[in-house]
Amino acid sequence: MIILLVLPIMMIILFGFGINTEVKNSKFAIYDPSNDVATQGIINKLNTSEYFTIAETVNNPSEIEQIFREGDVGFVLVFSENFYQNMLHTGEAQIQMITDGTDPNTANTLVNYAMALIGEYQRELMQISHIPFQIQPEVKLLYNPGMKGAYNTVPGVMGMVLMLICAMMTSVSIAREKELGTMEVLLVSPMKPFIIIISKMIPYFAISLINLASLLLLAVYVLHVPVNGSLVTLGLVSLLFIFVSLALGLMISTIVETQLVALLISGMVLMLPVILLSGLMFPIETMPLALQALAQVLPAKWFIEALRSVMIKGLGFSSIMKEVIVLSVMAFVLIAASFKRFKNRLE
């Protein structure tokens, strides 16, 4: 009954609000060595629209890459020196738009919106002065200049597959003991609940390592997605995510009574949020605040962000510390919840 009545409501909310290709209130940074009337006019044009919001001003071009590593802005607008003077004397002025190419669809959307607003400002300027000004935007995509879609989708699919498979494997482990009637043997055994829970996890952890290796080999040699960062860093964050996903399945297994219910929850119920709210297909920033908050509790969201940072951007361990800390806290909470639930059943 829960599947029949709750799932349709869940689907219409997630699909209705989660699937959104529009980009609104995207943050952008500015490097403006000219700081003249024309550059300020373009900046105000972008900032007053519903699509963009100024995040910060860059004082040195060397700071641009660090901004993208922090992941706070969608693109950086770089003006040429003497922008307005060049436009008055030569009729031409240059703007460079630097975007994060790890998500080519979002980057392309941001560029199109920005170019449309810049073109609108240019037309307004020409109507006032009757001079055929030409503002020439130049687009530069960091990390993915070829705009290959696999650079964005492969890390996301890896996160989705690992989470669903790991959660489904362990979700049936304790539920199977209950359903087959062998739980009594475990209850009267001298093993502590923590040992039983960890023992249930170890075989599936080994299987997950094989899945991880096969996914990485396919990503690199078949789909041609590079691993620009450290393999050690990639391996460590992947192992942590696998542990979190297995712990999530174990917690589900301690709650339900049958394998069928465990599979429905770990497979069907988890699949929609992971696909729509993890950043796999759609940017989280464009979603309503309630769904953005819900996305923060999904382990796949943090793993996908870390995976893209390491594989595509080539960042080190220090750059993904936030993701590692969040996943570590999730692992502790899930294992503690599983232990408490299992311990209550022992009593």
Image (cartoon, grey):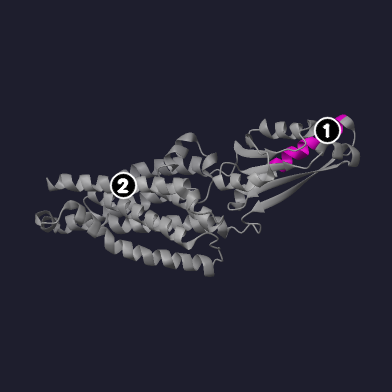
Q: Main secondary structure of the magenta part?
A: helix
Report the quarter where the N terminus lies.
Answer: top left
Is residue 78 magenta-colored?
no
Task: Tell me if 45 is positioned left or right of 289 in this view.
Answer: right
Magenta segment: 114-128
The residue lying at 61 percent from left, 55 percent from top is 143
Which residue has dot 1 on it? 125
Asked if one can make out residue 105 in the rendered structure from this viewpoint, the answer is yes
Element on which disc 2 rests: helix
Q: Amino acid at mark 1?
A: Leu
Give the x, y percent position of residue 305.
Answer: 49, 50
| Rendered position, 30 above or below 105 | above
Q: Residue furthest bottom?
A: 221
Q: Residue at x 83, y 33 (%)?
A: 125
Amino acid type of disc 2?
Phe
Mark 2 = which residue? Answer: 332
Q: Position of residue 300 (x, y in %)?
A: 43, 50
Whole-percent x, y for residue 176 in the image: 21, 58
Label whose residue precedes the other's in the sequence (1 or 2): 1
